[in-house]
Image (spheres, helix red, strand yellow):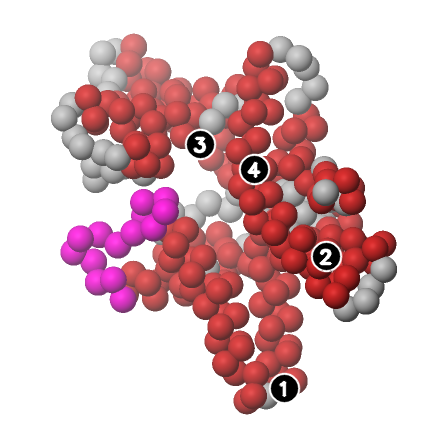
């Protein structure tokens, strides 16, 4: 029903994110590699629809209950999804996300955080206007928009607190850095401060760094001094060059090797957790 009524929702699996949209549009061929590249994005679109479809239906039914005609109810539901779940269409992008390819390098994977910025800004304005009576609602918005996503996303990815780390301190650091992800430039500085991966102004820099490391690793392997780190560098570089999800493949392979060596990992840990043995 939803796809029949809404053109936006019908195309959402390919347009929910600017970078995913651009990547899919670049895949033109019918070869096995092209089909695989398209398939790599399908699971992301599926999980997006698991959230955007209920959001659309709820907004659509709400509009009808308020007496809106069918056309207006559809437009209202479309707008709710775009404002709450992000979208990659030209009309949905913030000005900072548009422009030359050089400019767009610095806003990769920013679609959701652009939406989050607008939601936090709207909530702040409402709280300032209404004053003290709106404080409880502002607190709940902060919990749902910042605290829960910040903490749960890290836990799901296996990046929770270490055994010897204070949970409260870890939580405060995680939550403190999350809102900064909504500001281009600041998000990269914050990640450099709060994460163990260091500062990186754009994911494009990873590609160049991986290729440089791969060159050094090739020399190490050629002279008989190669190790697991060198193999990882070559894998990462190949992923960037051929457009393959090398990081996830490495994680899976590394964890499967750990399981074969006697380490007990659940299926979730084997698929998702990075550097599980550290």
Q: Is residue 49 visible?
A: yes
Q: Secondary structure at mark 2?
A: helix
Of the numbered discs in the image, which one, if any, rests on residue 209? 3
Marked residue nearer the N-terminal end (4 or 3): 4
Which one is closest to the eye, mark 2 or mark 1?
2
Q: Residue at x 77, y 40 (%)?
A: 4
Q: Dot 1: few (<14), some (14–19), or many (≥20) neighbours within 10 Å? A: few
Q: Secondary structure at mark 4?
A: helix
Which one is closest to the eye, mark 2 or mark 4?
2
Farthest residue in the bottom direction? 132
Which one is closest to the eye, mark 4 or mark 1?
4
Q: Quadrant of the C terminus?
A: top left
Q: Are marks 4 and 3 in contact (CB under 8 Å)?
A: no
Residue to which mark 2 is pinned: 60
Q: Residue at x 60, y 43 (%)?
A: 49
Main SS, magenta residues: loop
Marked residue nearer the N-terminal end (3 or 1): 1
Spatial distance from mark 2 to mark 3, Cα to Cα? 47 Å
Q: Are marks 2 and 3 in contact (CB under 8 Å)?
A: no
The front one of 222 and 127 is 127
Q: Residue at x 64, y 78 (%)?
A: 126
Q: Dot 3: few (<14), some (14–19), or many (≥20) neighbours within 10 Å? A: few
Instruction: Work out whether 43 lies above or below 171.
Output: above
Q: Quadrant of the N terminus?
A: top right
Give the residues drawn in magenta, as a range: 155-168
Q: Is residue 229 left or right of residue 17?
A: left
Residue to which mark 4 is pinned: 46
Marked residue nearer the N-terminal end (2 or 4): 4
Give the image quarter of residue 233.
top left
């Amino acid at each position: 029903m939803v796809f029949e009524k809404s053109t936006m929702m019908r195309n959402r699996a390919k347009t929910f994110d600017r970078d995913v949209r651009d990547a899919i549009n670049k895949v033109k061929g019918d070869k096995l590699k092209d089909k695989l590249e398209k398939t790599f994005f399908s699971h992301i679109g599926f999980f997006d629809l698991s959230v955007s479809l209920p959001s659309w239906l709820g907004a659509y039914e709400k509009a009808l209950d308020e007496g809106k005609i069918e056309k207006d109810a559809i437009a209202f539901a479309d707008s709710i999804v775009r404002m709450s779940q992000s979208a990659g269409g030209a009309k949905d992008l913030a000005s900072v996300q548009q422009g030359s390819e050089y400019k767009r390098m610095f806003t990769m994977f920013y679609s959701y955080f652009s939406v989050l910025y607008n939601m936090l800004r709207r909530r702040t304005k409402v709280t300032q206007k209404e004053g003290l009576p709106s404080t409880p609602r502002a607190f709940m918005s902060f919990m749902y928009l910042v605290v829960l996503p910040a903490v749960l996303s890290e836990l799901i990815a296996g990046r929770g607190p270490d055994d010897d780390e204070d949970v409260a301190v870890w939580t405060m650091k995680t939550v403190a850095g999350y809102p900064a992800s909504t500001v281009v430039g600041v998000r990269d500085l914050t990640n450099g401060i709060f994460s163990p991966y260091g500062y990186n102004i754009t994911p494009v820099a990873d590609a160049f760094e991986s290729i440089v490391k791969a060159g050094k690793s090739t020399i190490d392997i050629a002279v008989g001094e190669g190790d697991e780190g060198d193999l990882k560098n070559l894998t990462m570089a190949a992923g960037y060059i051929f457009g393959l999800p090398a990081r996830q493949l490495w994680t899976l392979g590394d964890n499967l090797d750990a399981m074969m060596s006697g380490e007990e990992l659940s299926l979730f840990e084997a698929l998702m957790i990075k550097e599980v043995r550290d």
